Image: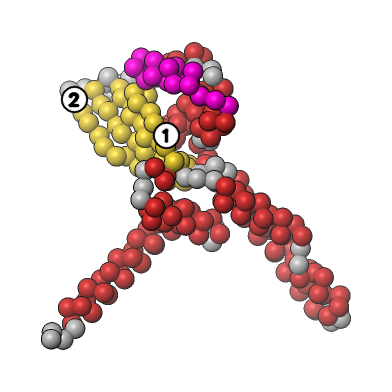
Amino acid sequence: MKQFFNGAEYAIGRTTEVLAAENLEDSSDMFGKEIYDKLKSRMTELNDETREKLLVKSEDIFFSWIEGVQNVEKASQIKFVALSFPGYAEMKQNMKERTKIEEEMKKEISELVSQKENIEVIRPKLTNSKIKDINNKRAQMYDSGQIIVTNTTFSRDSDNSSWTLKDFSMKESQSVHTPLGSFLWKFRLKVAIETKRDFLVFLRWDYFTNFLILLATAVSLCMAPSS
C-alpha cells in the first residue's frame, strides 16, 4: 500500500508539472484516454499565473488518503485524495536550518559563560539575523499560500497491469472546506511545522485531544444536577 501512496503522490506531482509546462504528449502513457482528452482541453484554458498555482511537488504533499476502492471482476479503481501546501518541504527544511543555528548559538554562549566572559560580550550572541530572516521567509510563505486539495482516480484492468490516472481535479481548500475547516487544516499544518512534528502524528494527537474534550464535556453534562 505504501508503494501505491508513493506512486500516486508522484503521479500528482508529475501531472501538475506536465500541465504547468504544457507538455502533455510526452507523458500520455500515464493517463487513460478520457482524462488525457480532459487535461488537453483544460490546458488551453490556463494562463501563466494559473499554471504556476497548479504545480504541486510530491514533497509538498503533507497528507493523503484513499477515499474509496471499487473492484469489478479483475479491474480495480481507487479514489485518492491529497492535501498539499506550496513550499511545505522548504519550510520543514527551513526549520532544520533554524534549529542548527540555534544549537550553534547555545554552544557558543555556553563556552563564553564557562569562560566567565562579561555580559556585554555575551549579549550580541543572543540574537542572530539569520534566524530572523528564516522566520520571516517561513511566515511569508505560510501567509501567502493556500492548501490545495487534489482528487484523483486511478484504475487498472488486472493485478498485473499498471495504474493509470482516470480522473483528476484540484481546488483550493476554501472552495472545498467550510471557513472553519479550511482554517483548522492550515493551523494544524503550521503547528506541525513549527513544532517539527510529522503532520500525521500531530493530526492524530489533535483528534485525540478533541475527543477527550468532547468526552469530558459529555461526562460533565451527564453528571450535572437536573433542575
Please tell me how many numbered marks the rendered image carries: 2
Q: Amino acid at mark 1?
A: Met
Q: Which residue corresponds to the image point at 70% horizontal and 64% vertical from the top-left? A: 103
Instruction: Answer with mark 1 or mark 2, whichever residue precedes in sequence.
Output: 2
Q: Which residue is mark 1?
A: 170
Main SS of the magenta part reads: helix
Helix, strand or loop status at disc 1: strand
Checking the image for residue 72, the label placed there is 2
Mark 1 vs mark 2, foreground winner is: 1
Looking at the figure, which quarter contains the C terminus? bottom left
Q: In the figure, 158 relative to 110: above or below?
A: above
Q: Is residue 200 visible?
A: no
Q: Give the farthest residue toward the left.
A: 227
Q: Nearer the viewer, residue 48 or 210?
A: 48
**Of the residues shown, which amino acid type is indicated by label 2?**
Val
Callout 2: helix, strand or loop?
strand
**Where 52 falls versus 63 (above or below)?**
above
The image position of residue 94, as x and y in percent, is: 64, 51
Horizontal and vertical percent position of residue 99? 65, 60
The quadrant of the picture occupied by the N terminus is: top left
Q: Is residue 38 rendered magenta in the image?
A: yes
- Residue 144 is situated, as x and y percent measured from the top left of the image, at 57, 47
